[in-house]
Amino acid sequence: MKFALNIVDWQARAPGLGDASQWHQWSQMPDAIVPSAPQSKLTELPMMTTRRLNSGSRLAVECGLAMLRRQQVDAVLYTSRHGELERNYRILQAMATQQAVSPTDFAMSVHNSAVGYLTIAAQKTVVSSSLSAGIDTFQQGLCEVVCMLQAGYQRVLMVDFDGMLPEFYHSYLPKQMPTWAYAVALVFEAGETLQCESKAESEGEEPELPQSLQFLQHYLKGASTFVISGERLKWYWSHA
């Protein structure tokens, strides 16, 4: 598969990383992200909304609101490998111990709750969708973005995110799998600046960074070519 697009704007959040200068510095000297580092202060989210959202959704909506404030966007895609796992774990724990399930947890346990809250917080009617595809969630999200652009949407906001994975699951996960919250927001338009081609060469190993953070690292560093591995494919990128 081959596709191409342009990046109009971006924003990201992870432990210890918030503003653009911090991310640019990280891209040049990409030390491991320290899970215990504090998240940067949120500036876009209303306080009541912040209290309702889990760690990943909070960052995803924060970044999404910043992009909607700065850019004219006519479609939104949220991608997340694990979705509302924190909330779903609480529901399962309550049921296993015969406790009452929180109505808020139940109502917001669906995969598209973050993108729904974005449109509510922004008070903006916009075409929106959500997607999950394992290790390849980010790259498959980009395929969806390309389809949206080909369908006639001028600018598409994509936010890739995950929340803190509950400690209960840690012993069952690959050791290198990130378990901390992050979000990467990118605004795309049609173009040829970034080109990507997929090839069936991957061994499906769990990466140390989610695909979106790998992509952001190479993009900010100004790499002319780079490769992102997926479960069954390798994604070869070139930057004109």
Image (tube, rainbow, N blue to C red):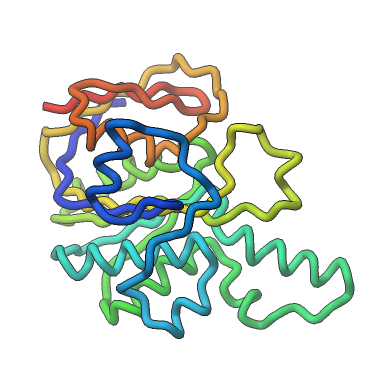
Q: Position of residue 15 (x, y in %)?
A: 45, 52
- 238 vs 133, left or right, is left
- 82 vs 31, left or right, is right
Image quarter hosting the N terminus: top left
The quarter holding residue 89 reads bottom right
Depicted 52 relative to depicted 93: above or below: below
Report the residue that reaches farthest toward the top: 201
Image quarter hosting the C terminus: top left
Q: Position of residue 191 (x, y in %)?
A: 11, 39
Report the residue that reaches farthest toward the bottom: 48
- 238 vs 90, left or right, is left
Depicted 164 relative to depicted 124: above or below: above
Depicted 102 relative to depicted 149: above or below: below
Total labels: the figure holds 0
The residue at 57%/73% (across/down) is 108
The residue at 53%/61% (across/down) is 111
Q: Position of residue 224 (x, y in %)?
A: 18, 22
The quarter holding residue 54 reads bottom right
Front one among 217 and 74:
217
The residue at 31%/35% (across/down) is 217
Depicted 40 relative to depicted 206: above or below: below
The residue at 63%/61% (across/down) is 86
